[in-house]
Image (cartoon, helix red, strand yellow):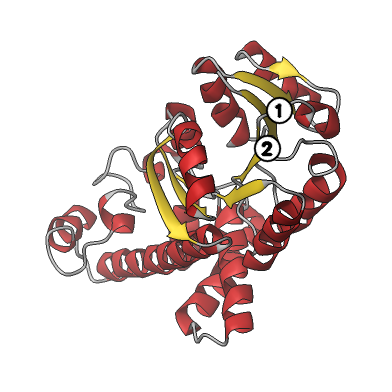
Amino acid sequence: MAKIAFIGLGNMGGPMAANLAKAQHHVTAFDLSDAAVKTAVEKGAHKAASAAEAVKGAEIVVTMLPAGKHVREVYEKDVLPNVAKGTLLIDCSTIDVDSARHVAALADKAGMEMIDAPVSGGVGGATAGTLTFMVGGDDGAFGKARPILEKMGKNIVHAGASGNGQAAKICNNMILGISMIAVSEGFMLAKRLGLDAQKLFDVASTSSGSCWSLVNYCPVPGPVPASPANRDYQAGFTAAMMLKDLMLAQQAANAAGASTPLGAEAAQLFNLFVNSGNAAKDFSGIIRMLDGK
């Protein structure tokens, strides 16, 4: 049993911390939301009054925070000054690559091992413990972190050096955002041409148009019963989170001099969708905007 500090108990972090507690680890939890901490305690965690208090005596620190600025602040002010040398640090936030590498360098200088380990799989995956982790960091830190990550996910990929986990996440989600728009456009064209959605699905899902956005997350009601389209686009992965990831991808593309015209267009379309009052809707709901609704 490891002593784990978990900071950030939102929609993803809360279930992840619960799974660590379920695995009999001693989890000390902190979040700015008292309600989130209360829920974590009900799931087996122990309450901390602050992030600094949570990490004292911890063997492992796991963070799940909204953005790079929050990760920098928490590690610089609360984590690094209060943990012992040799503590393993795992940041599961989805943030910019530069922030991930900046914090990892600070951790290394302070004698800590750190990985960036953003996730894919949504709230359902966090709850079920079936997340995919994309991990950046050296081999030693990855090896130590893997048994902890395995209590929260089932697919764990070592993507390379520090920051590469974030790079893998934003590249993957840029592909996802673009492909969802393409699938949505295909169904809207089919609708206007008088082609039944199920017939298009039957063709495209077994031919060259097949992709994850179609087969697993079809944006029209009917063909894939588990998709959010069948529950009024109640979010599995919100449009706001997709926009965040697309903007991170554009930031990285600009810094690296990479040409991503479709990624840029996807970011603009999701920005329109989010700012039309759809931030909390599932990202597949963008089909409604493309349908003129």
Does residue 225 appear anywhere in the picture?
A: yes
Badge 2 vs badge 1, beta-carbon distance below 8 Å: yes
Q: Measured from the top left, where is residue 18 in percent x and y?
A: 57, 22
* Closer to us: 220 or 135: 135
Left or right: where 11 falls relative to 160: right
Q: As shown in the figure, which amino acid type bears the numbered disc 1?
A: Ala
Relative vertical location of residue 20 with respect to residue 161 in this rendering, above or below? above
Quarter placement of the N terminus: top right
Residue at image mark 1: 58
- Which residue is depicted at the point 47% across and 67% down? 171
- Which residue is depicted at the point 58% across and 37% down? 12
Quarter-of-image position of residue 59 = top right
Which of the numbered marks, if any, corresponds to residue 230?
A: none
Mark 1 Cα-neighbour bin, 10 Å: few <14, some 14–19, many ≥20: many
The numbered mark, 2 or 1, whose residue comes first in the sequence reads 1
Q: How many marks?
A: 2
* Closer to us: 74 or 281: 74
- Which residue is depicted at the point 74% across and 51% down? 71
Quarter-of-image position of residue 208 = bottom left
User: What secondary structure is marked by label 2?
Assistant: loop
Does residue 272 appear anywhere in the picture?
A: no
Residue at image mark 2: 87
Q: Measured from the top left, where is residue 235 in percent x and y?
A: 51, 42
Q: Measured from the top left, where is residue 289 in percent x and y?
A: 50, 63
Q: CA distance from mark 2 to mark 1?
A: 7 Å
Relative vertical location of residue 205 with respect to residue 174 in this rendering, above or below? above
User: What secondary structure is marked by label 1?
Assistant: loop
- Which residue is depicted at the point 23% across and 47% down? 223
Q: As shown in the figure, which amino acid type bears the numbered disc 2?
A: Thr
Mark 2 Cα-neighbour bin, 10 Å: few <14, some 14–19, many ≥20: some
Left or right: where 161 falls relative to 211: right
